[in-house]
Image (tube, helix red, strand yellow):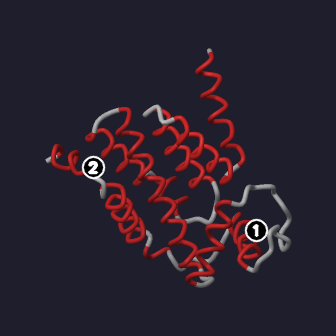
Amino acid sequence: MSYVLGDLLHRRFANPFLFGLFSILLIAAHAPLLRLQYFWDEAGYYVPAAFDLSAGSLIPHSTPSNAHPPLVLAWLALCWKLVGFHPAVTRCAMLLLAAFSLLGFFRLALAVSNFRVAAWATLLTAAYPVFFAQSSLAQVDLPAAGLIFWGFESYFRRRIGVAVIWFSLAALAKETAILVPLALFLWEIA
């Protein structure tokens, strides 16, 4: 069975299929929580800042700045422009980023191990309470981690140019992600 699934993953449609599967499973698992109001840092910074962007402001002005880069905020602003401003839209938008993160994690695990290890590691990551709780929140940590997963996957497959793009996007999601390529660089020259 794992041979058939492993063969499927080498086909062109494997990534869209897995992304769709992860998206459906995450949204279904979070269905009772999709209408929860914003809380914690969501209500204090991320949602107001993203709302400012969706209203056309290039710099958030309705909340004190905390200097986070704009990638996740711009994603939320785009989703609100396309679908509407509602907590369920925000939660689903963040769950799509979580599904993309899981796909990156799966590909990373597949790059350094085998299909069985990658599948189990991805399943356990998705079920991990911290991942589950953070995956629907309008915060920048999980999307940054997901982009780092994609960067590591490209790095271990020796596609350095692609890894640079992923790590750059991770730094645009959360500024501390810049430490990852720096650490890899120092490791390479050591």
Q: Quadrant of residue 25?
A: bottom left
**Residue placed furthest toward the left:** 1
List x then y, in percent, for residue 50. Answer: 71, 71
Taking 155 as reference, is 53 left or right? right
Viewer-side residue, 112 vs 166: 166
Residue at 53% of width from left, 80% of height from top?
35
From the viewer's perspective, is residue 51 above or below residue 112? below
Residue at 60% of width from left, 43% of height from top?
167
For disc 2, the neighbor class at 10 Å (few under 14, some 14 to 19, many from 20) is some
To which residue does mark 1 refer? 44
From the viewer's perspective, is residue 5 above or below residue 133? above
Taking 46 as reference, is 5 left or right? left
Spatial separation of the CA atoms under disc 2 and disc 1:
41 Å
Taking 2 as reference, is 112 left or right? right
Element type at mark 1: helix
Residue at 60% of width from left, 82% of height from top?
86
To which residue does mark 2 refer? 9
List x then y, in percent, for residue 161. Answer: 55, 38
**Residue placed furthest toward the bottom:** 84
Count how many numbered circles sit on residues in the image: 2
